[in-house]
Image: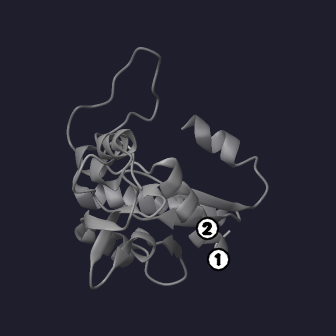
Amino acid sequence: KKRWEVIEKLPASKILIGTNFQLFSMAKRSYENYSLGGTNDNSKLADDLVHASFKNSVERLRGLGHQPIIMNQPPQPSVDVYKESQRMIRKGIGFENSYGALPEEAINNKLKELFKGDYTIVDFDSIFCDQAKGCLNFDEEGGLYNRGNHLSEHGVQKTLKYIKENSIL
């Protein structure tokens, strides 16, 4: 709730929104008047309410003159990329394109449905996946993830390059 006080003071700008959409399924109802030491209601929210709340936040940003840019869910790597990178470095094995990560189709299709029309969505499948080969765990420069589907520094740099090349920011 306090973040909106800060956001409302910002000049209109592009705002990059990245979140772990997998965690939406565990959302709980929050209290409007939270006090220090208090806890949220423990009842699980229905998925449609969680998605509606997220969309309302995006619309609120637009209403304030901002241009929200939504980053969809990155692919799920098929190996522990961090551990495998460390092993490859120790053994002197060079990096090459290695596929096997799985696209988060259900989540990303839901986002496409939710944000039809004039919305900017950064599609990680366009960055990390090849329709014929699947999604990358590694490319020739290194691992794309760090502990699960969190992007590694290299994954972030690859994403930023895509964003710049496509004039998203």
Q: Secondary structure at mark 1?
A: helix
Q: Amino acid at mark 2?
A: Lys
At which x and y percent is residue 106?
A: 23, 69
Give yes or no for contact between labels 2 and 1 (Cβ–Cβ under 8 Å). yes
The residue nearer to you, when weighing 55 against 167, is: 167
> For this view, does 84 lie left or right of residue 66?
left
Residue name at image x 34 percent, y 60 percent: 51
**Image height check: is 41 above or below 147?**
above
Quadrant of the rendering where the C terminus is positioned: bottom right
Which numbered marker is on residue 165?
A: 1
The figure's colour scheme reads one colour
What is the number of callouts on the image?
A: 2
**Residue position marked by numbered label 2 in the rendering:** 161
**Image height check: is 135 above or below 130?**
above
Residue extending furthest top?
Answer: 37
The residue nearer to you, when weighing 37 against 156, is: 156
